[in-house]
């Protein structure tokens, strides 16, 4: 009789544990949604880190390698482009680093995931941006000559 009672209690315990595990399981659609949200949050975090790193790398003064009288100077979240023979006195303007251009621009083509865009809100201008070590490249599409352009700067020490 004791063994029979023990077996009954054991069976009840096993069945209740199995049911408890099923209660903790999420249906596939809920699991997929949680995974999608987690992946989206991870992607947003990666983008924020990439932007922060880019902002840090941009800081300082840069000189164009093909035309040495053109410079770019980044201070915090402002930039000043200086070039010889311009009518207006150069001044610092705000800039942003983003994944896309918020303005109606036709100078950016073939934008890929992971591309970084330098956005200049005051002039509603955007350029593809690539920065590594001591090289800064601004690129896009010129509507004047219907060709791609790359402006390459070296960081001044």
Image (spheres, rainbow, N blue to C red):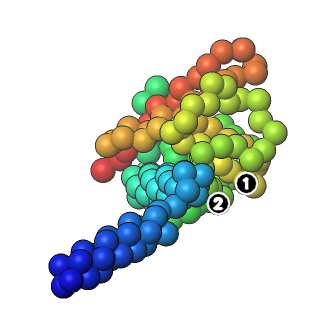
Q: How far apart are marks 2 and 1 (CA)?
A: 7 Å
Count the numbered circles shown: 2
Q: Quadrant of the N terminus?
A: bottom left
Identify residue for label 2.
Answer: 94
- 2 or 1: tag closer to the N-terminus: 2
Decide: is 60 above or below 10.
Answer: above
**Residue plotted at (44% across, 45% down):** 62
Are the residues at dot 2 and dot 1 in contact (C-beta closer than 8 Å)? Answer: yes
Farthest-out residue, bottom: 2
Disc number at residue 54?
A: none
Farthest-out residue, left: 3
Give residue 126's position: percent from left, percent from top.
67, 41
Q: Which of 138 and 80 is in front in this view?
A: 138
Decide: is 93 above or below 101.
Answer: below
Q: Which of 77 and 84 is in front in this view?
A: 77
SS label for mark 1: loop
Give residue 101's position: percent from left, percent from top.
70, 43
Give residue 17's position: percent from left, percent from top.
36, 72
Farthest-out residue, right: 104
Q: Residues within 10 Å of mark 2 (few under 14, many from 20)?
A: some
**Residue plotted at (69% across, 23% down):** 142
Place residue 53 in its image quadrant.
bottom left
Q: Residues within 10 Å of mark 1 (few under 14, many from 20)?
A: some
Give residue 7's position: percent from left, percent from top.
24, 75
């Amino acid at each position: 009789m004791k063994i029979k009672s023990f077996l009954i209690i054991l069976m009840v315990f096993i069945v209740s544990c199995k049911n408890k595990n099923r209660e903790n399981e999420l249906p596939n659609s809920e699991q997929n949604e949680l995974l999608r949200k987690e992946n989206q949050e991870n992607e947003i975090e990666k983008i924020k880190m990439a932007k922060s790193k880019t902002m840090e790398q941009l800081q300082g003064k840069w000189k164009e390698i093909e035309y040495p009288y053109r410079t770019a100077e980044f201070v915090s979240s402002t930039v000043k482009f200086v070039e010889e023979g311009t009518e207006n006195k150069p001044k610092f303007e705000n800039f942003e680093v983003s994944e896309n251009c918020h303005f109606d621009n036709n100078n950016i083509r073939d934008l890929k995931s992971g591309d970084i865009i330098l956005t200049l809100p005051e002039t509603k201008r955007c350029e593809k941006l690539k920065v590594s070590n001591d090289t800064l490249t601004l690129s896009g599409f010129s509507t004047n000559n219907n060709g791609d352009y790359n402006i390459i700067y070296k960081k001044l020490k």
